[in-house]
Amino acid sequence: MFSVGLWLTRSTVTSSGVVLGLLATAISVASLAQLGTIFGALTLRYRQVTAIFGFFNFAFQMLTGMFIPIQILPGPLQILGQSLPQTFGMDLLRHYVMGTKSIMPVEYEWILLFLQLVILAVIARLAVLYLEREAKEQGLHYI
């Protein structure tokens, strides 16, 4: 699939574009790892979080530009999609590799991508600290 993608984008792909696109993807993956830590802490603490996982699974597929460009979604859904960590990573990758128009100016997308990573890292750290405190007070019998 990667080879077919490269073949289809052979007129727009550049080595610097691939590097910048992969960097944006790596930052998105790091943000998703923080989100995974938050979900892991929620699962360990509350156990019944399948409804939340179902919503995020749908949101990640439909609201982040994974299948369709986010620009064609209605305004409120675009705002919701822009709050998800992989939206800007996918948009930047698409912009650098395929030469598409980005959601907003590229500099703002990079800033928001880094900001999302930092915010999710702080929330993940707080969630783990809370889980550790609860485990010390109550023990791990709820796992």
Image: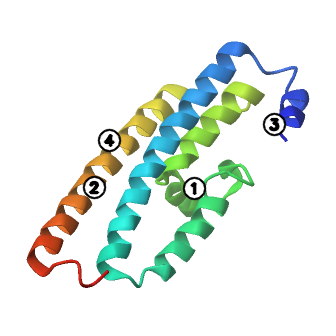
Q: Secondary structure at mark 3?
A: helix
Disc 2: CA contacts within 10 A as few (<14), some (14-19) or many (>=20): some
Which amino acid does the dot numbered 4 rest on? Val
**Whether residue 99 can be seen here:** no
Residue 40 against residue 71 in the figure, above or below: below
State the residue at coordinates (11%, 71%).
136
Residue nearer the viewer, 103 or 111 = 111
In primary-sequence order, the first of circles 4 and 3 is 3
In primary-sequence order, the first of circles 4 and 1 is 1
Please tell me the numbered disc located at residue 120: none
In the picture, measured across the screen, residue 138 lies left or right of residue 59, that is left
In primary-sequence order, the first of circles 1 and 2 is 1
Quadrant where the N terminus is found in the figure: top right
Which amino acid does the dot numbered 2 rest on? Ile
Q: Secondary structure at mark 2?
A: helix
Residue identifier under label 3: 2
Residue 23, position in %: x, y?
55, 28
In the picture, measured across the screen, residue 99 lies left or right of residue 37, that is right
Which amino acid does the dot numbered 3 rest on? Phe
State the residue at coordinates (65%, 14%).
16
Residue identifier under label 1: 78
Among all residues in the image, which is located at the extreme left?
Answer: 137
Residue nearer the viewer, 109 or 10 = 10
Residue 108, position in %: x, y?
46, 31
Residue 132 against residue 14 in the figure, above or below: below
State which mark lies toward you, 2 or 3.
3
Q: Compute the Cα span from label 4 to label 1.
A: 22 Å
Quadrant where the C terminus is found in the figure: bottom left
Residue identifier under label 4: 118
